[in-house]
Amino acid sequence: MKYRLVTALASALLALPAAAEVTQVRVFRQYTLPYLAVMVMEDQKLLEKHGKALGVEVEGKWSVVSSPAAVNDALLSGNLDFACAGINAFLTIWDKTSTTSNPVLGVSAYNASPQLLNTRNPKVRSIRDFTAADKIAVPAVKVSYNALILQMATAKEFGLANYTKFDALTVALPQAEATAALISGMLEITANFSVPPYQYLQLQNANIHTVLNSYEVLGGKATLGIIYTTKKFHDQNPKTYAAFMAAYNEANALIKRDPLKAAQIYRKLSRDKAPEEFIIGMLRNPEIDFDPAPRRLMMLYDFMKKTGHLKADARSWKDVFFPEVHGEPGS
């Protein structure tokens, strides 16, 4: 479906009269495996390729930014064209801009992967076993995707009124540092709500086990993060936008077709020292994909709305995405 939609869109755009579009597209991503499709776009110059096919000369400018708040600030200030961040960061900026003349909407999902809450504390077999003696590392306290999933799991166990019960145990720590701390046992960190590849590296240590899987909380495969942009950029750069979508779809196809090449690109751009076979194993894991359909997004929306973090109403995931992706089987 997505390839037919992109082809039809491209054909229609080629018939449009020439108009001035941006010549440089600024994209922020992070360095972990969930951002692989965006890394492939960068490495293979797919945006440039599809831009040329649509009659626009465009260059991608790719930067690594770890803070979702910084990403959103850059987008709103006009210093960024496409943002990549967790669902809650996306929904937050959508909510903030939904009633303005330039709302932020979703372009595509960029990854579905389970997030594992791992611990080295042998006494912790479920989240009910955490005590004040534990410290749980997350990318960002309260506002990261991992922290949100922990809150959702807590609400299931202890009731919605107690969803922040474990917030006081969480500490912000980059994934690489959190993994080193968890494995070494030298810091106060006893658990880490992580992402691929770090969560799987942690589990190679016999003293570490999984307490919680985000897919269990959400009831199945679920999108981790979203690519998003402003209505102004979307409307003023139709060919560039279409080129970006086509480039993303080609990157996703490459990952599925040639996991070895995808793993090599990941290791080069992320500087991850993990063996190729280890990365390939994750790419062949059926629980991980880079499809553009946003899965279970509305579950996170509903939770954020109930807990007072969102005010705007959305009846469907399509209400928060640009129409080009509405043909995907999202939820």
Image (cartoon, helix red, strand yellow):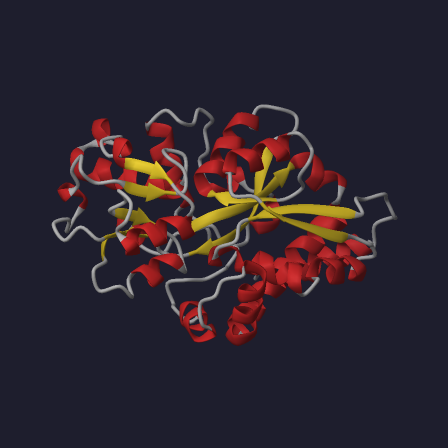
Residue 115 appears in the rendering: no
- Image-quadrant location for residue 127: top left
In the image, residue 68 above or below residue 223: above
Camera-nearest residue between 290 and 136: 136
- Percent coordinates x, y for residue 160 in the rendering: 23, 30
In the image, residue 155 above or below residue 45: above
Camera-nearest residue between 297 and 204: 204
- Percent coordinates x, y for residue 198 in the rendering: 38, 57
- Percent coordinates x, y for residue 34 in the rendering: 48, 56
- Percent coordinates x, y for residue 122 in the rendering: 14, 53
Q: Quadrant of the N terminus?
A: bottom right
> Which residue lies most toward the right here?
18
Q: Is residue 17 left or right of residue 93?
A: right
- Image-quadrant location for residue 56: bottom right
Q: At 48% from the left edge and 59% from the top edge, which residue is drawn?
A: 33
Q: Is residue 67 left or right of residue 206?
A: right
Camera-nearest residue between 191 and 56: 191
Q: At 64% from the left edge and 55% from the top edge, which residue is drawn?
A: 245
Camera-nearest residue between 320 and 211: 211
- Label tally: 0
Residue 32 appears in the rendering: yes
